[in-house]
Amino acid sequence: MSDNESTAKSNKQVIKGRGSSSKPDARYLKYTRHQIDDGWEHEKEENKPVTTVTIEKPKTIIAKNKSPDIPFDQSINAYRGCEHGCIYCYARPTHAYYDLSPGLDFETKLFAKPNAAELLEKELAAPGYKCSTIALGTNTDPYQPIERQYQITREIIAVLNKYHHPLTIVTKSSLVERDIDLLAPMAEKKLVQLFVSITTLDHQLMQKMEPRTTAPKRRLQILSNLISAGIPTGVIFAPVIPVINDSEMETILKYAAEAGSNTASFVMLRLPHEIKDLFKDWLDTHYPLKTSHVMNMITDIRAGKKNDPNFHSRLTGTGVYADLIQKRFVKTCKQLGLNVGENVSLDTSQFIKPVLQGQQHSLF
């Protein structure tokens, strides 16, 4: 049987260039809609959904967290929503806070924060601010397509570079190479570490699962180019999806090591809130014969549920399958010389607190 499962035709409609083919209602809406088949074929406007960008002007830009299982306590998201369209994205449910669908709306109705760099400089200058690494790319990709126009991520990096503030970046996009002129000097001062997320090397799977991301082989080239520029760059195999991409882990790690990376990690798929239905719908659309098998395995990984929000286990899962993935990962990393030695340690001691107009310089 082929990967396309041609023997089991799905009646689900595929929207070219989009990860989701549906617009489920946000979970906080008072009233919800139900689709019915009235026997007529309608030309639906979502057949060719257009991306729109709304300007957002937040009052603060640095988000804080106290999660013990992630290596940062500060992050910045220049955008809400992400045009990459990754069907598995754990950030999709955040669109429900705006009464928008975590499905198509998440990847077509985007929000940009053009005042992010200005806010960042003010927050860094605050008397009580204490320097710790800021992470970019924790909710949505900082280099998604609209960054070419808005350049908010570049402005944020420029501010952090100016004041010698450390940062980490996670991305799937080749657009990160545009900012090597800023990132390479920061790397020399031990102020930056990057991670390239690679989910699959199968181009057809990528087009179905994360349709507007950089092509798989090109992501390996991103790794090589960043490392050649002196920027410490690791690979993240994420998410691990049973039956769909789990067999690719060793190959992806091998190619990443050959590209020069010496750091690797993985994240297990989890399906919070609306994502569980979106992902099942995606399976029904593209791999209908595998739907039950995949969803059952996810349930096994998540202790009988589709999602595990608990610290530590949410990233790796639990049970026999999760243990097997962990053992395979550790064994492969050992064979390839990945994750050997000390982790990259970013330097917070070089931070220079901004002095804004009207502020008094510190005596110390």
Image (spheres, rainbow, N blue to C red):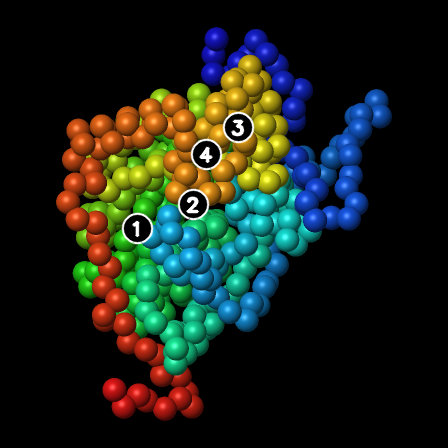
- The residue identified by callout 2 is 311
- The residue identified by callout 4 is 269
Amino acid beneath label 1 = Leu
Asked which secondary structure carries label 3, the reply is loop
Mark 2 and mark 1: span between their CA atoms?
23 Å
- The residue identified by callout 3 is 304
Q: Is residue 94 above or below residue 73?
A: above
- The residue identified by callout 1 is 194
Tag in front: 2 or 1: 2
CA neighbours of label 2 inside 10 A, class few (<14), some (14 to 19), many (20+)? few
Looking at marks 3 and 2 on the same chain, the residue that comes earlier in the sequence is marked by: 3
Residue at image point 38% right, 23% down: 320
Q: Position of residue 30 (x, y in %)?
A: 77, 48
Query: Can the viewer see residue 144 in this picture?
Result: yes
Tag in front: 3 or 1: 3
Amino acid beneath label 3 = Gly
Residue at image point 39% right, 77% down: 128
